[in-house]
């Protein structure tokens, strides 16, 4: 009798598993991964699916087909013509080898090349936040902040206090944060800012990560724009652990950029688009405020930049396409830093093909996990790539969280997107693709310095790992498309 009941439960579970997985369109790898979860973990698997597997409702995704999007693009192009007169941006500002990358982004993300920006690179949290707070204190018109993580801790309070002061002075302050990434931070944390006229809302108005019941489709972007003149983009979030104050991670190694120039307008545009789908009751009117949020800028630098966004509202996976194009274009070397290495087949093939063609491919990952399954899957792919001649470095001096791709000392990408399925397809991301040998040389020097604090892992080193560790890596890899 008991066996019969169990058989019926298993049968019902399988029927619901098939219905659940196939009712939504997804790629084959993700489909099989979810069938494994739902079939081998009856009942419990559906709880996992509720958090990790469900897509954003079409009603929410529809918000991203904004009318504002086209208006914003035309505004940015008008501003660019006014300040740069950049009709020949493809031919005269980027070396021949990378013009196709510029065209790719113009086609897929409708983003123009922004010329002659000034960029400063930060790799330490304390230095970064000192500069951010200094810029906030000098703000005279607007401060827009968007982060995956905005914690209720020492640095979180420090930033919030400065925002409150500026809002009291009449500066327009808007904050977007992700409820999952900022878990533990109560909504009333931002009440002092709201009480003095500022705005702070969780992305897409999702006030509770638990009540929303969805782990995927998070706002993983990290954007700060001050007065429409200074912008920040990279891997750091707002939290004490990003300043090396958490014993678990120790020293936190990340990469972030401070940009001045017309590329800041593209960061501003993305923030406004994200704000307008998050708080539809207090939308920022682009037409009425274009001079306020998009002031005239005077470029003094040498860096040409494309700000590229991607997310589940588009099937193009623009940042992933950019990564693949960079790897394919590499003639001498392509060096990558990413805390998570879980590439899909297209990215995996690009890396393997480049390595087997004699390109010096190096990938630096952490020596410690922050998410067990994700880390074991990262180790699995690191081992597989080492087989084809990819040099794998485990960063030993704390936790490396940088998302950097560097090619031939000519072009580099820094932003929020990791080298994994989640950043490619499931989260909202933003990266700066920079065409500048000077910036590329700085990032090259930073990478070389990081290698001094890293261990090179060969395929033979991976092969010596215990059978139990290898099993965990292979097992975790089965769920790669949904990690």
Image (cartoon, helix red, strand yellow):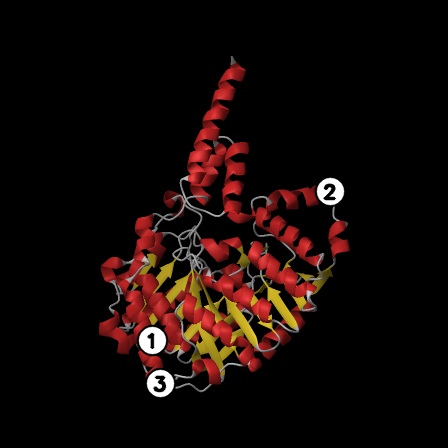
Q: CA distance from mark 3 to mark 1?
A: 10 Å
Could you say which is closer to the camera, residue 342 or residue 143? 342
Q: Are marks 3 and 1 in contact (CB under 8 Å)?
A: no
Alpha carbons under labels 2 and 1: distance apart: 55 Å
Q: Which quadrant would residue 249 be assigned to in this image?
A: bottom right
Residue under label 2, please give it. Answer: 467
Please tell me how crowded label 1 is: few (under 14), some (14-19), or many (20+) other residues with Cα within 10 Å: many
Q: Is residue 133 left or right of residue 169?
A: right
Mark 3 sits on what residue? 83
Residue 76, disc:
1
Q: Label 3 crowding class (10 Å Cα cut-off): few <14, some 14-19, many 20+?
A: some
Viewed as shown, does residue 136 lie left or right of 408? left
Q: Position of residue 366 (x, y in %)?
A: 63, 58
Of residues 413 and 193, the one drawn nearer to the viewer in this rendering: 413
User: Which mark's residue is nearer the viewer, 3 or 2?
Assistant: 3
Residue shown at the point (47%, 74%) measured from the top left: 102
First in sequence, mark 2 or 1: give its number: 1
For image coordinates 60% across by 64% down, the residue present is 337
Question: Is 163 drawn above or below residue 419 in the view shown?
Answer: below
Q: CA distance from mark 3 to mark 2?
A: 61 Å
């Amino acid at each position: 009798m008991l066996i019969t009941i169990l058989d019926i439960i298993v049968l019902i579970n399988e029927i619901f598993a098939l219905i659940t997985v196939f009712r939504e369109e997804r790629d084959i790898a993700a489909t099989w991964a979810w069938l494994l979860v739902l079939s081998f973990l009856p009942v419990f698997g559906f709880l996992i699916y509720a958090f990790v597997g469900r897509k954003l409702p079409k009603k929410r995704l529809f918000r991203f087909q904004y009318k504002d999007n086209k208006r914003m693009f035309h505004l940015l192009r008008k501003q660019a013509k006014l300040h740069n007169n950049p009709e020949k941006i493809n031919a005269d500002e980027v070396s021949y080898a990378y013009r196709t990358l510029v065209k790719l982004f113009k086609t897929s993300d409708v983003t123009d090349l922004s010329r002659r920006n000034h960029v400063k690179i930060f790799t330490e949290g304390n230095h970064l936040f000192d500069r951010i707070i200094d810029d906030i204190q000098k703000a005279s018109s607007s401060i827009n902040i968007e982060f995956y993580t905005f914690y209720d801790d020492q640095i979180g309070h420090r930033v919030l206090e400065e925002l409150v002061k500026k809002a009291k002075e009449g500066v327009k302050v808007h904050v977007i944060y992700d409820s999952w990434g900022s878990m533990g931070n109560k909504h009333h944390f931002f009440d002092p800012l709201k009480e003095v006229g500022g705005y702070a809302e969780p992305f897409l108005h999702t006030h509770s990560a638990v009540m929303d019941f969805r782990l995927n489709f998070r706002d993983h972007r990290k954007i700060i724009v001050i007065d429409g003149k200074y912008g920040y983009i990279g891997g750091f979030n707002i939290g004490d652990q990003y300043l090396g104050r958490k014993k678990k991670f120790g020293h936190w190694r990340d990469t972030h950029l401070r940009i001045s120039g017309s590329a800041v307008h593209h960061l501003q545009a993305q923030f406004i688009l994200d704000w307008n789908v998050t708080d539809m009751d207090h939308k920022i009117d682009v037409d009425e405020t274009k001079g306020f949020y998009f002031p005239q800028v005077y470029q003094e630098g040498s860096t040409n930049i494309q700000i590229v966004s991607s997310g589940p509202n588009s099937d193009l996976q623009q940042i992933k396409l950019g990564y693949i194009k960079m790897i394919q274009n590499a003639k001498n070397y392509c060096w990558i830093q990413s805390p998570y290495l879980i590439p899909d087949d297209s990215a995996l093939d690009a890396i393997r093909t480049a390595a087997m063609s004699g390109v010096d491919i190096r990938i630096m990952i952490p020596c410690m996990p922050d998410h067990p399954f994700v880390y074991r899957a990262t180790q699995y792919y690191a081992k597989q790539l080492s087989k084809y001649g990819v040099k794998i470095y485990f960063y030993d001096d704390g936790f490396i969280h940088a998302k950097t791709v560097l090619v031939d000392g000519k072009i580099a990408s820094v932003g929020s997107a990791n080298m994994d399925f989640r950043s490619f397809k499931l989260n909202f991301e933003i990266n700066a693709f920079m065409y500048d040998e000077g910036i590329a040389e700085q990032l090259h020097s930073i990478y070389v310095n990081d290698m001094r604090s890293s261990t090179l892992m060969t395929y033979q080193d991976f092969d010596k790992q215990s059978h139990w560790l290898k099993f965990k890596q292979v097992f975790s890899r089965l769920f790669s498309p949904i990690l």
